[in-house]
Structures are given as C-alpha cells and as structure tokens.
C-alpha cells in the first residue's frame, strides 16, 4: 500500500472536519487551527489553500481509507524568501503507522522541485515527541529551542525549530536509509562518509 498526496478538494471537507475535530490534534498544533473544528472551518481552509499562491498543501490519502490528514509547505516572503514552513497532521485513528513520515517525505520532494526553495523548517512543541521523530526521520536537524515560548492549555512549553536544507535533502535521497524508510543520515558528512 502506498500513501498518496493530491491537492485538497471541496469534497474533502467532511472527512477533514471529522478528523480535525479532535482535541488531541489541537493540543499539538498552533491555535490558528480552531477547536472545535467544524465543516465550515474545513471548507474555509480548503478555499484559502486553493487560492493561495504561497502554499503547497496536499490531502494525505491512504488506500482503502481515503483522506487521513494534510501536509503542506507555506512559502515565506522576503527576507525569508527561499524558505518554507512545513505543517502536517494525521487523524488520530492513523497515528503510529508511518503516514506522517511518508507524507512529509513526499511533500519535501514536491517543494524542493521548486528551484527557489533552499530551506524547509518546522516548529514543534517540546512535548510532541511524535512530530520530532517524523522530522528526524526525514533528515531535519534541530536548530533552535525557544525556551518557555508556548502557552498551550495553560501550560508553558519550549518550542523547537527543525530545519532541512536542499543539499541535505538531495544527499539524503541518495542514502539507502531514505528509500528503506529508516532514519536517514543526519548530516552531509554522514552520507559522504
């Protein structure tokens, strides 16, 4: 079975709303994703993504299931041109199956196919170990820990920024670990030996 990505469609709204209306998902994302998450929120999100020239957001599809989440790159403006922020989530019934790691790998391939993209970054809350694993499996390196930067559910947390450069992505693709879905090399030196 192979996970697939495709552009979001209005027909994804019911499944998106059903899966995203989950406090466990909301606990791990920024508050700009509303909770409760309604069908109207889903339709608005899809419409915004379809109209945006600065976002590459895809529906994550699993065979015999259909829609299981979203993954996307949000392209930055000057002075951060050439960078994009990675965002993703998977519906709770599908956690722990490697879908997020595969979806991230695929969207990175789409993003780095754009000649102007040189860096992708993602931020995670320090308690979100699952997302940390997804990023590390895809070759991201920890860049910054912003201490006590997040207030979520009345608790203060660190925010961790991970980054991946185009050269690191290109070299990781040559690594057997990349194609075998094991943890890829963490640095250019690891790939080159």
Image (spheres, rainbow, N blue to C red):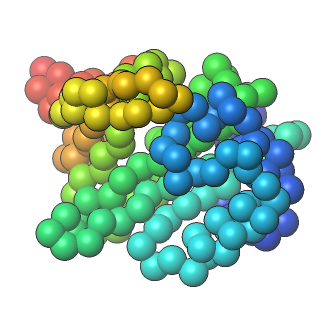
Query: Is 137 displayed left or right of 119 in the figure?
Result: right
Is residue 174 visible in this depiction of the protein?
Answer: no
Q: Position of residue 133 (x, y in %)?
A: 43, 22
Q: Is residue 122 above or below residue 117?
A: above
- The relative height of residue 79 versus residue 180 in the rendered view (above or below) is below
Estimate the x, y position of residue 149 in percent, counting from the top left. Answer: 29, 34
Q: Place residue 118 in its image quadrant.
A: bottom left
Residue closest to the eye, 149 or 103: 149
What percent of the width, then of the height, locates residue 181? Answer: 49, 25
| 140 lies left or right of 5 | left
Residue in view at x 73 percent, y 36 percent:
22
Residue appearing at x 60%, y 58% in the figure:
58
Give the side of residue 109 with respect to residue 3, left or right.
Answer: left
Image quadrant occupied by the N terminus:
top right
List x then y, in percent, for residue 143. 18, 33
Image position of 107 with respect to 168: above or below = below
Q: Residue at x 26, y 72 (%)?
A: 77
Nearer to us in this view, 119 or 167: 119
Quadrant of the rendering where the C terminus is positioned: top left
Image position of 180 (left or right of 61): left
Residue at position x 86%, y 56% in the image: 14
Q: In the image as oriented, which residue stretches furthest toward the front?
A: 154
Is any part of residue 193 visible from this angle?
A: yes
* Number of numbered labels in the structure image: 0
């Amino acid at each position: 079975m192979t996970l697939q990505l495709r552009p979001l469609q209005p027909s994804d709204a019911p499944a998106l709303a059903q899966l995203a209306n989950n406090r466990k998902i909301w606990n791990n994302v920024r508050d700009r994703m509303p909770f409760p998450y309604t069908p109207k929120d889903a339709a608005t999100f899809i419409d915004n993504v379809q109209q945006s020239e600065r976002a590459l957001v895809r529906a994550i599809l699993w065979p015999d299931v259909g829609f299981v989440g979203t993954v996307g790159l949000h392209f930055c403006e000057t002075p951060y041109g050439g960078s994009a922020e990675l965002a993703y989530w998977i519906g709770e019934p599908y956690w722990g199956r490697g879908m997020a790691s595969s979806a991230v790998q695929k969207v990175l391939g789409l993003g780095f196919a754009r000649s102007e993209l040189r860096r992708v970054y993602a931020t995670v809350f320090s308690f979100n170990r699952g997302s940390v694993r997804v990023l590390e499996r895809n070759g991201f390196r920890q860049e910054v820990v912003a201490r006590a930067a997040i207030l979520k559910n009345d608790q203060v947390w660190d925010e961790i920024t991970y980054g991946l450069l185009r050269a690191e992505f290109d070299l990781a693709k040559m690594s057997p670990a990349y194609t075998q879905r094991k943890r890829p090399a963490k640095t250019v030196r690891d790939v080159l030996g």
